[in-house]
């Protein structure tokens, strides 16, 4: 499985600006967000604004044209990473109609991203428990799919939010586990965890295994 080029960068492309000044502002903001995402991935958020602007190769004054503080920038960096990830999942799972398969495919794809797009993976991991309560990215989509599975009679879950906690905890810990154990097969680990979650949600064991053995979509850019 190959990830589209637009997803390999964890920032979300804006609409083409209309003039040179707008284009320059867009490039400057993107450079700042990219620098912040790199720092988050490295666990280096306690840095001065000057270090961020140097990493982005922009002037100090440019920073405050876009963000009021470091905290605002780092939040934007996480939000844009979540948005990019969520957009990718929406695109790749769009043809599916079974909520159980949608949930499993999104989980399996995310598990593979920990190796395929390590910087995006580390931004997600560093966001930690905030990922569960975020209204962007993986969490709201996973909750949507869990609730759809309950409504369709596919999942026997008493509390969809607790199911989300289990799924989010699994995907975050899986990411850290794969970074810490580079010899482990990321695809096999992702598929096994997705299968276990489906079984926990009420899907029979043989069906859960079959769902998580299906080929994943071709993610080549068209």
Image: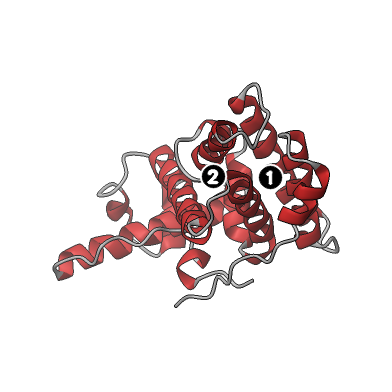
Q: How is the image coloured?
A: secondary structure
Give percent across and percent down for residue 132.
57, 33
Quadrant of the rendered image containing residue 167: top right
Compared to residue 18, the image places residue 124 above or below, namely: above
Q: Residue at x 39, y 62 (%)?
A: 31
Q: Is residue 23 left or right of residue 176?
A: left
Q: Is residue 202 left or right of residue 48?
A: right
Locate residue 14, reporting x and y percent: 30, 60
Whole-percent x, y for residue 197 in the image: 74, 40
204 or 53, nearer to the observer: 204
Task: Compare residues 57 and 76 and report the one nearer the observer.
Answer: 76
Do the CB atoms of the residues marked 1 and 2 lie less than 8 Å apart? Answer: yes
Q: Is residue 19 visible?
A: yes
Mark 1 neighbour density, 10 Å: few (under 14) some (14–19) many (20 or more): many
- Which label was assigned to residue 171? 1
In the picture, measured across the screen, residue 23 lies left or right of residue 186, that is left
Residue 177: horizontal and vertical position, in percent? 79, 49
Task: Find the distance from the CA under tag 1 to the CA under tag 2.
Answer: 10 Å
Which mark, residue 138? 2
Quick check: 6 above or below 11? Answer: below
């Amino acid at each position: 499985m190959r990830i589209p080029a637009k997803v390999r960068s964890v920032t979300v492309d804006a609409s083409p600006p209309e003039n040179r000044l707008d284009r320059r502002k867009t490039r400057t903001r993107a450079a700042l967000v990219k620098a912040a995402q790199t720092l988050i991935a490295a666990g280096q958020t306690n840095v001065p604004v000057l270090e961020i602007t140097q990493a982005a190769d922009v002037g100090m004054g440019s920073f405050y044209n876009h963000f009021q503080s470091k905290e605002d920038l780092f939040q934007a960096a996480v939000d844009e990473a979540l948005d990019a990830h969520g957009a990718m999942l929406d695109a790749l799972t769009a043809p599916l109609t079974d909520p159980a398969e949608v949930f499993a495919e999104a989980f399996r794809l995310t598990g593979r991203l920990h190796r395929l797009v390590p910087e995006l993976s580390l931004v997600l991991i560093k966001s930690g428990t905030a990922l569960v309560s975020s209204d962007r990215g993986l969490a709201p989509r996973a909750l949507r799919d869990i609730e759809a599975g309950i409504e369709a009679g596919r999942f026997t879950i008493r509390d969809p939010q607790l199911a989300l906690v289990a799924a989010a905890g699994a995907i975050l810990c899986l990411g850290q586990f794969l970074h810490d154990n580079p010899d482990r097969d990321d695809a096999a680990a992702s598929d096994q965890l997705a299968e276990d979650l489906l079984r926990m949600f009420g899907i029979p064991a043989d069906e859960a295994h079959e769902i998580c053995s299906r080929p994943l979509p071709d993610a080549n850019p068209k």
